[in-house]
Structure formats: C-alpha cells, structure tokens
C-alpha cells in the first residue's frame, strides 16, 4: 500500500525517535482462510524516544526487554 | 511468502466496510494487560511516566493548534484493579481509577500526569468507564479455520 493510498500521508521518520513494534509469536500457528498459516501477531506500534546510549533502541530499553537479542550497535 | 502488494490487498479487504469516524474511547488490551485511553487518533510518541503509566503525545502537534497529549495507558491493569478493590465484573469508573493511581504512586510526575493530562483528556473526551474482563481471553480477531 503506498503512502498516498486511503488518505495516508508519507512523512519522514522523526528525529531522535525510534519506531517500536511489539510482535508476539503464536504458540501454534493458526490457519486463516485466504491468508494461510499465521505464526505471530503485531500487538502494537508507536514512536518512542531513542536511547541516548544505544542508537536505534528505545529509551530505557534495558527495563523494557529481558534480553538484548540484537542491535545495530552491539 | 506474500508480496507487499498481496499483504496490502489483504489489509484492505480486512477493513472493507469496517471503517468509521474515530471516537474517544477507553478499552482493555487483554493480551498486554493494559488499559488504553485514546482521545484522538494520530501518530503518537509514547513516553513512560513510570513502569505502569505511559502518556501519548501527538508527534505533530507543534505544526498545528492541537493539544499535545492525546491519550495514556495503564499497564498491569487487571492486577492493579484487583489490588485496589475494583469490581472487575462491572465497568470501572476511570475517574476513580485515576484517584487510585494517585494514591498508589505518590509523586510530582504522577500527579502532573493524572491532573494535568489524564483527567482533562477523559473529561473532554467524555470517556467515563472501561470494562476489564475478569477472565483472560484472546484478541477479537477472526476465528482461525
């Protein structure tokens, strides 16, 4: 879907903020008609201030997540 | 693996006929155990007040004459409400919930959040109650086959 469809407007990404998406893996994949197997769900998404000590991560990432699995700045 | 165009078509199909005008609302997010109060639908910045409270700010309010704060979330809502004597079998009065939050988390930041952001939002949006199912369920998405 392009940014101009359905009344949407494409904007440049916000400075000093990161876009956070929470994704949940399903314990067992569900089958949906016309879609197929679904292995996970997007729970929510939003902008959050960027952590000053770890670029590309949300602020207070150490409190938000139990483990750092990966980051652009290891 | 579906292409971006196929995914776009699926999303469009899923929302066909389901769109309508946004209304200020409060609802319980069962999977994340949090109450979400949304007064305006827009791109937002989430800022944590403490591990339980988050305020939602319009990312583009400076470019308009709109107010900056558009909503908030209360995490651990089911546990908090149970601990503070709310009956989960009936809708919860948000004003009473905010009173309980003030008592539970004394401090300037929470006081500013409750009295400066949350109360005005629920008053202006006429958002009075929120329902919390007493038994954990699942998201109201289409049933799998």
Image (cartoon, rainbow, N blue to C red):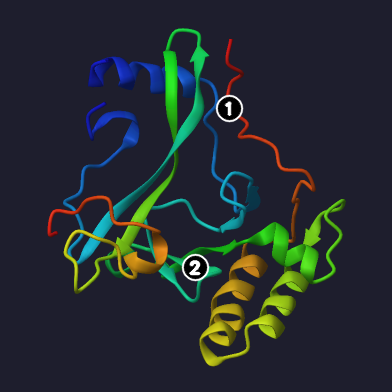
Q: Which residue is mark 2?
A: B54
Residue B65 visible to an observer of this rendering: no
| Residue A15 percent location from the top left of the image | 17, 64
Residue A3: image x %, image y %? 23, 35
Q: Return the disc, 2 or 1, that comes first in the chain's sequence.
A: 2
Percent across and percent down for residue B75 are 58, 62
- Displayed quadrant of residue A9: top left
Tag 1 residue: B141
Rendered image quadrant of residue A68: bottom left
Secondary structure under the numbered disc 2 in the rendered image: strand
| Crowd band around label 2 with a 10 angstrom C-alpha radius: few (<14), some (14–19), many (20+) | some
Question: Which residue is drawn at the image coordinates 43% and 30% (left, top)?
Answer: A40
Q: Quadrant of the N terminus of chain A?
A: top left
User: Quick check: B76 above or below B29?
Assistant: below
Question: Badge 1, how many Cα within 10 Å: few under 14, some, many 20+?
Answer: few
Q: Measured along the vertical axis of the image, is residue A5 above or below residue B6? A: below
Q: Is residue B62 left or right of residue B110?
A: left
**Nearest the camera: B126 or B119?**
B119
- Residue at 57 percent of width and 91 percent of height: B107
Tag count: 2
Compared across the picture, whether A43 is left or right of B27 comes to left
The residue lying at 34 percent from left, 70 percent from top is: A60
Residue at disc 1, secondary structure: loop
Which is more toward the observer, B15 or A20? A20
As drawn, A53 above or below B127:
below
List x then y, in percent, for residue B60: 30, 62
Chain letter for the residue marked with disc 1 in the picture: B
Q: Disc 2: which chain?
A: B
């Amino acid at each position: 879907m392009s940014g101009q469809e359905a009344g949407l407007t494409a904007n440049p990404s916000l400075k000093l903020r990161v876009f956070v998406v929470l994704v949940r893996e399903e314990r067992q994949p569900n089958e949906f008609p016309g879609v197929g197997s679904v292995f996970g769900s997007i729970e929510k998404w939003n902008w959050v201030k960027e952590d000053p000590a770890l670029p590309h991560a949300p602020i207070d990432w150490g409190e938000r997540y139990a483990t750092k699995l990966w980051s652009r700045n290891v | 693996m579906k292409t971006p165009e196929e995914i776009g078509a699926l999303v469009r199909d899923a929302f066909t006929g389901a769109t309508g005008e946004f209304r200020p609302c409060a609802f319980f997010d069962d999977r994340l155990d949090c109450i979400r109060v949304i007064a305006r639908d827009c791109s937002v910045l989430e800022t944590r007040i403490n591990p339980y409270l988050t305020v939602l700010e319009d990312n583009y309010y400076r470019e308009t004459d709109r107010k900056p704060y558009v909503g908030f979330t209360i995490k651990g809502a089911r546990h908090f409400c149970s601990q503070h004597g709310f009956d989960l079998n009936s809708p919860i009065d948000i004003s009473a919930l905010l009173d309980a939050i003030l008592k539970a988390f004394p401090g300037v930041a929470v006081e500013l959040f409750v009295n400066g952001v949350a109360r005005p939002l629920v008053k202006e949006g006429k958002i009075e109650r929120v329902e919390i199912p007493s038994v954990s369920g699942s998201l109201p998405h289409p049933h799998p086959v």
